[in-house]
Image (spheres, rainbow, N blue to C red):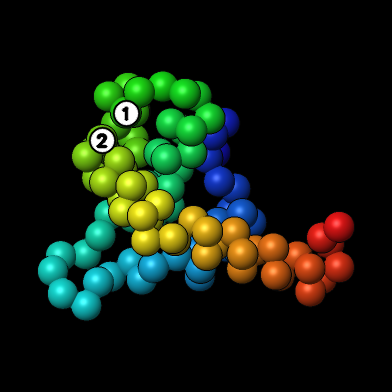
Amino acid sequence: MRRYELTDAQWEQIAPLLPPQKPRTGRPAEDHRQVLNGMLWILRTGAPWADLPARYGAVGTVSIRFYRWRQTGVFDQVLRRLQAQADARGDLD
Protein backbone atom coordinates (compact mmCIF):
# COMPACT_ATOMS: atom_id res chain seq x y z
CA MET A 1 0.00 0.00 0.00
CA ARG A 2 1.29 3.43 -0.90
CA ARG A 3 1.28 6.42 1.38
CA TYR A 4 -1.82 8.14 -0.03
CA GLU A 5 -3.94 5.06 -0.67
CA LEU A 6 -6.86 3.60 1.24
CA THR A 7 -6.16 0.61 3.44
CA ASP A 8 -8.21 -2.56 2.89
CA ALA A 9 -10.21 -1.78 6.03
CA GLN A 10 -10.97 1.77 4.86
CA TRP A 11 -11.95 0.51 1.41
CA GLU A 12 -14.30 -2.10 2.89
CA GLN A 13 -16.17 0.68 4.71
CA ILE A 14 -16.37 3.04 1.74
CA ALA A 15 -16.94 0.67 -1.21
CA PRO A 16 -20.61 -0.17 -0.48
CA LEU A 17 -21.42 3.55 -0.20
CA LEU A 18 -20.21 4.46 -3.69
CA PRO A 19 -22.28 4.40 -6.88
CA PRO A 20 -22.45 1.03 -8.68
CA GLN A 21 -19.19 0.03 -10.33
CA LYS A 22 -20.98 -1.24 -13.42
CA PRO A 23 -23.46 1.23 -14.89
CA ARG A 24 -26.78 0.08 -16.35
CA THR A 25 -25.67 1.09 -19.82
CA GLY A 26 -22.36 1.73 -21.52
CA ARG A 27 -18.97 0.33 -20.70
CA PRO A 28 -17.91 -0.52 -17.14
CA ALA A 29 -16.30 2.27 -15.14
CA GLU A 30 -12.65 2.19 -14.16
CA ASP A 31 -12.02 0.62 -10.77
CA HIS A 32 -13.49 2.89 -8.07
CA ARG A 33 -10.69 2.13 -5.62
CA GLN A 34 -7.95 3.06 -8.07
CA VAL A 35 -9.74 6.26 -9.09
CA LEU A 36 -10.56 7.24 -5.49
CA ASN A 37 -6.92 6.69 -4.52
CA GLY A 38 -5.99 9.05 -7.36
CA MET A 39 -8.39 11.66 -6.02
CA LEU A 40 -6.89 11.31 -2.56
CA TRP A 41 -3.37 11.64 -3.98
CA ILE A 42 -4.33 14.94 -5.63
CA LEU A 43 -6.06 16.25 -2.50
CA ARG A 44 -3.26 15.25 -0.14
CA THR A 45 -0.35 16.44 -2.27
CA GLY A 46 -1.94 19.58 -3.69
CA ALA A 47 -0.45 18.70 -7.07
CA PRO A 48 -2.18 19.70 -10.31
CA TRP A 49 -4.22 17.07 -12.12
CA ALA A 50 -1.56 16.83 -14.83
CA ASP A 51 0.90 15.43 -12.26
CA LEU A 52 -1.34 12.50 -11.29
CA PRO A 53 0.74 9.28 -11.40
CA ALA A 54 -0.31 6.88 -14.15
CA ARG A 55 -0.97 4.10 -11.62
CA TYR A 56 -4.25 5.86 -10.72
CA GLY A 57 -5.54 5.85 -14.27
CA ALA A 58 -6.06 8.52 -16.87
CA VAL A 59 -6.12 12.09 -15.55
CA GLY A 60 -9.37 12.73 -17.41
CA THR A 61 -11.06 9.70 -15.87
CA VAL A 62 -10.05 10.59 -12.32
CA SER A 63 -10.79 14.31 -12.59
CA ILE A 64 -14.13 13.85 -14.37
CA ARG A 65 -15.30 11.35 -11.76
CA PHE A 66 -14.14 13.67 -8.97
CA TYR A 67 -16.10 16.61 -10.35
CA ARG A 68 -19.14 14.45 -11.18
CA TRP A 69 -19.22 12.89 -7.71
CA ARG A 70 -18.80 16.29 -6.11
CA GLN A 71 -21.62 17.77 -8.18
CA THR A 72 -24.01 14.87 -7.54
CA GLY A 73 -23.31 14.80 -3.80
CA VAL A 74 -21.61 11.39 -3.64
CA PHE A 75 -18.95 12.64 -1.21
CA ASP A 76 -21.53 14.30 1.04
CA GLN A 77 -23.63 11.14 1.07
CA VAL A 78 -20.63 8.94 1.92
CA LEU A 79 -19.65 11.28 4.75
CA ARG A 80 -23.19 11.28 6.20
CA ARG A 81 -23.38 7.48 6.07
CA LEU A 82 -19.95 7.01 7.68
CA GLN A 83 -20.89 9.49 10.41
CA ALA A 84 -24.19 7.69 11.02
CA GLN A 85 -22.37 4.34 11.28
CA ALA A 86 -19.82 5.81 13.70
CA ASP A 87 -22.61 7.38 15.76
CA ALA A 88 -24.49 4.06 15.93
CA ARG A 89 -21.31 2.41 17.26
CA GLY A 90 -20.85 5.20 19.79
CA ASP A 91 -17.63 6.34 18.13
CA LEU A 92 -18.82 9.86 17.28
CA ASP A 93 -18.51 12.69 19.81
Please report the residue visible at 50 percent of the width from the left and 24 percent of the height from the top. 45
- The disc labelled 2 sits on which kind of residue? Val
Q: Can residue 55 be seen in this view?
A: yes
Q: Determine the secondary structure under disc 1.
A: helix
Q: Locate residue 6, reporting x and y percent.
A: 55, 46
Residue 83 relative to residue 47: left or right = right
> Can the viewer see residue 2?
no
Q: Do the residues labelled 1 and 2 touch (CB within 8 Å)?
A: yes
Look at label 1 and name its amino acid.
Trp
**Marker disc for residue 30:** none
Q: Is residue 9 above or below residue 53?
A: below
Q: Residue furthest bottom?
A: 24
Q: Which residue sits at x=36%, y=47%?
A: 66
Q: In which quarter of the image is residue 25?
A: bottom left
Q: In the displayed orientation, state which residue is furthest to the left.
A: 26
Disc 1 versus disc 2: distance between alpha carbons? 6 Å
Q: Viewer-proximal residue, 67 or 10?
A: 67
Residue occupying image coordinates x 47% and y 23%: 46
Q: Which residue bears the numbered disc 2?
A: 59
Q: Quadrant of the C terminus?
A: bottom right
* Residue 42 percent across, percent down from the top left: 43, 31
* Number of on-image labels: 2
Is residue 3 positioned above or below 80 on the image? above
Q: Which label's residue is closer to the chain start, 1 or 2? A: 1
Q: Where is residue 14 in the image (x, y as percent from the top left)?
A: 55, 61
Whether residue 92 sits left or right of residue 17 in the image: it is: right
61 relative position to 84: left or right: left
Residue marked by disc 1? 49
